[in-house]
Amino acid sequence: MGGLDGRCILVTGAGRGIGKAYAKTLAGEGARVVLADIIDAGPAAAEITAAGGEGRAFHVDVSDEASVGKLVQDVVEAYGGVDVLVNNAALWADLKYKPFWEQTPEEWDRVLGVNVKGIFLLCREVFPHMRAQGSGKIINIGSITAEYGITGFLHYVTSKGAVHGLTRALAREVGEYGITVNTLAPGFTLSEKVLEMGDFVGKADERSHATRCLKRSEYPQDVQGTIIYLASPASDFMTGQLIIVDGGVVFT
């Protein structure tokens, strides 16, 4: 069917938006996809099944240690292991533009709890299983905002900067076990959830057009090829890297 035949790929935040697009893309390449989300990912899994792929929905709160532990236990029992982990779950489209001096400690705890702690918890839970099988791929979803900064979302930008650093440090810790860790950082992507952000979307997209080499909007399908590559054997000798797919906004 595809280059990912039979691989178990766990995608967090897969119930909607760009996470759902990742899940559908990976299933289209033959992967057995676990769609994990705090919302009901059943409809997204049903779309994969209807298209002839294999997808199954699981509930998880990535910021909760017990919830993450149960998720990984259930997935390992169902599939025998986890070959690829895509840490996509994050608070972004649900956030409101707010100057940093108006952001509360509670808001910071919530954003970093999902966007950073959630990745740590997932990586910690899947690691023993990947180590036992002698291989594994962890794909963390970052953001180009951590490379140049934007106003009004200091908590989010900070969290994504932490993800980029986490990727590099974790790659050095787990490489000896045959596990790779990389970050995929899309630009401002017009996913179904982002389109619900109201007037902010149009203004942000206009700014992206102004600074982007390729003068058009970015859509979930623009990162399909990269997520397939990072999940496939083609990327087996790449780790600790930040891969930016933004149409030429940020150069590193």
Image: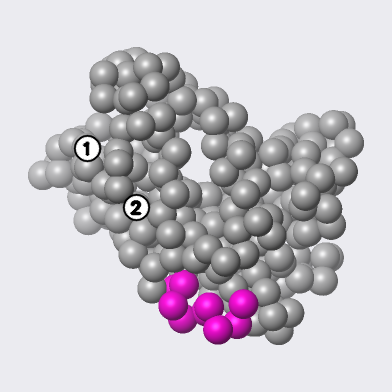
Q: Where is residue 179 drawn, in percent x and y?
A: 59, 73
Q: Tell me the number on the disc at residue 140.
A: none
For label 2, the SS is helix
User: Does the stretch in magenta take in 171?
Assistant: yes
Q: Where is residue 152 drawn, in percent x and y?
A: 20, 36
Depicted 187 relative to depicted 103: above or below: above
Q: Where is residue 136 drawn, in percent x and y?
A: 65, 69
Residue interval drawn in magenta: 170-178
Q: What residue type is labelled 2?
A: Lys
Q: Taking 106 as reference, is 114 left or right?
A: right
Residue 41 appears in the picture as rendered: no
Residue holding disc 2: 160
Residue extending farthest to the left is 101
For label 1, the SS is loop
Q: Where is residue 216 drawn, in percent x and y?
A: 42, 17
Residue at 20%, 50% in the rendered image: 104
Question: Which sits earlier in the primary sequence, circle 2 or circle 1?
Answer: 1
Residue holding disc 1: 150
The quadrant of the rendering that contains the N terminus is top right
User: Does the stretch in magenta take in 57?
Assistant: no
Residue at 41%, 44% in the rendered image: 244
Q: Taking 72 as reference, is 226 left or right?
A: left
Q: Is the magenta stretch mostly helix, strand or loop?
A: helix
Q: Which amino acid does label 1 sit on?
A: Ile
Depicted 53 relative to depicted 112: above or below: above
